[in-house]
Amino acid sequence: VEVGVHHHHVGRRRPFPGTLGEAATPRRAPERSGALPGAHAQHGPRTGVGLEGELGPVPALGLLGEAEEAVDLVLIAGPCVIESEESCLRHATRLREITSKAGYPFVFKCSFDKANRTSHKSFRGPGLDKGLAFLEKVKRETGVPVLTDIHEPGQARAAASVVDVIQIPALLSRQTDLVSEAAGTGCVINLKKGQFLAPWDMRAVVSKAEATGNRGIIV
């Protein structure tokens, strides 16, 4: 299971109704991300992109619907790759229950294709069409927003028609065509930092996304 902990000042650019559940109460993030074992934290100022200076402030990802109170932590979690429709629904339903009780907004993450496997014989997932159909059903039946990553510019439009967040994999974070095409859909974009990049080098990646007019950017 992949878990990402994102600290943001949550805005209302693109609301995801029902994310918190009717009984949930928004809570502030813990002082340290270590409160969630196994999670990795992505910190940033309250601009929503994790970068300051020349970029200026941009709207943050909205997850609370019409709720007035903002939270500092949004949980992105789910299986690494789609194994089956049943698996997606089971994980999304259980994670929704856990995060609703904890009072944290939740985005379900799962990949339709893991193109960066070590071996060409490794399981990669169901592929674009079947995988997006599974994610659409998860979104419809559980009411949670969904995120998936793409590996080719030609996958961006199809993904944006289903998911709430498109993720750019870390190893592909400098691919201009991929970033531009994904951001150009108008979908919220999660730009993962390449392991080979210093944090400040992500300014250039964010600039590529911003050049399309998209301001729904997470780093």
Image: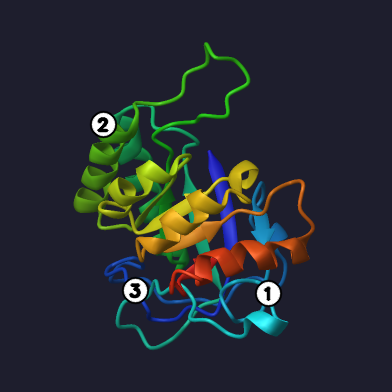
Q: Can you identify the residue that label 2 sits on?
A: 130
User: For the point 56% across and 53% down, which residue is it?
Assistant: 176
Q: Secondary structure at mark 1?
A: loop
- What is the C-alpha distance between the residues marked 1 and 2? 36 Å
Q: Secondary structure at mark 2?
A: helix
Q: Secondary structure at mark 3?
A: loop
Foreground disc of the pair 3, 1: 1
Residue 88 point in image, percent of width and height: 34, 37
Q: Can you identify the residue that label 1 sits on?
A: 51
Residue 33 point in image, percent of width and height: 69, 62
Eyeballing the image, is 1 above or below 14? above
Q: Which mark is residue 14?
A: 3
- What is the C-alpha distance between the residues marked 3 and 2? 26 Å
Amino acid marked by disc 2: Lys
Q: Residues within 10 Å of mark 2 (few under 14, many from 20)?
A: some
Amino acid marked by disc 3: Arg
